[in-house]
Image (spheres, rainbow, N blue to C red):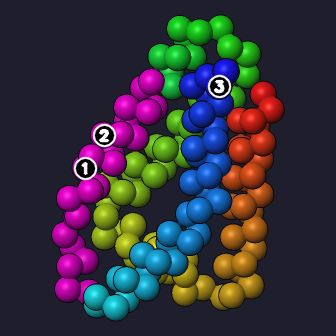
Amino acid sequence: MMDYFNMLSLVIGSAMVCSRMALDLLARRWEAGGERSWGRRPVWVMPVGALILGTIGTSWYNLFATGISLAILITVIATVVLSRALWMLMDYPRFRTYVVKVLSIDPKRKERLTERMMVAGAALIIFGLLV
């Protein structure tokens, strides 16, 4: 049976693998829309922020409530990754600038970044399936 930490590892790993496609779609949409709404934060940002905080809290609670080995590893990874995502989302204009900048960099650098994200995401997926 899959426990919380296996599921969390699979979800974060899948998000890392799929994030490059999502960033590409967001950047194209933002470029097409121009800069007319760059300062406004969309409605979805606050619920996603609450979900991220809930996930971090639940991870730490489950770490101390269960005696699962290696749970500290995925809890720390989840806390670092999700804290960074939360920080970027709450500063939405900087987040948009970052996405456009990442997608407009040199194609070789973009390719290396994509490879690293895919490898890290695949490692987390394998960790979630095997451990």
Mark 2, mark 3: which one is toward the viewer?
3
Front residue (pair 65, 130):
130
Residue count near mark 1 (Cα–Cα under 10 Å), binned few <14, some 14–19, many ≥20: some
Residues at discs 1 and 2 in contact (Cβ within 8 Å): yes
Would you place residue 49 above or below residue 34 in this image? above
For the point 20% across and 86% down, which residue is it? 36
Where does residue 118 sit, x and y in percent of width and height? Answer: 72, 61
Q: Amino acid at mark 2?
A: Ala
For the point 78% across and 28% down, which residue is it? 131
Residue 87: in magenta span = no
Q: Which mark is residue 46?
A: 1
- In this orientation, does residue 14 appear? yes
Q: Secondary structure at mark 3?
A: loop
- The stretch of residues the image draws in magenta is 35-58
Where does residue 69 sit, x and y in percent of width and height? Answer: 73, 16
Q: Amino acid at mark 3?
A: Met
**Dividing the picture into quarters, in which one does residue 11 lie?**
top right
Would you place residue 109 above or below residue 61 in this image? below
**Label 2 belongs to which residue?**
50
**Label 3 belongs to which residue?**
2
Q: Amino acid at mark 1?
A: Met
For the point 59% across and 9% down, which residue is it? 66
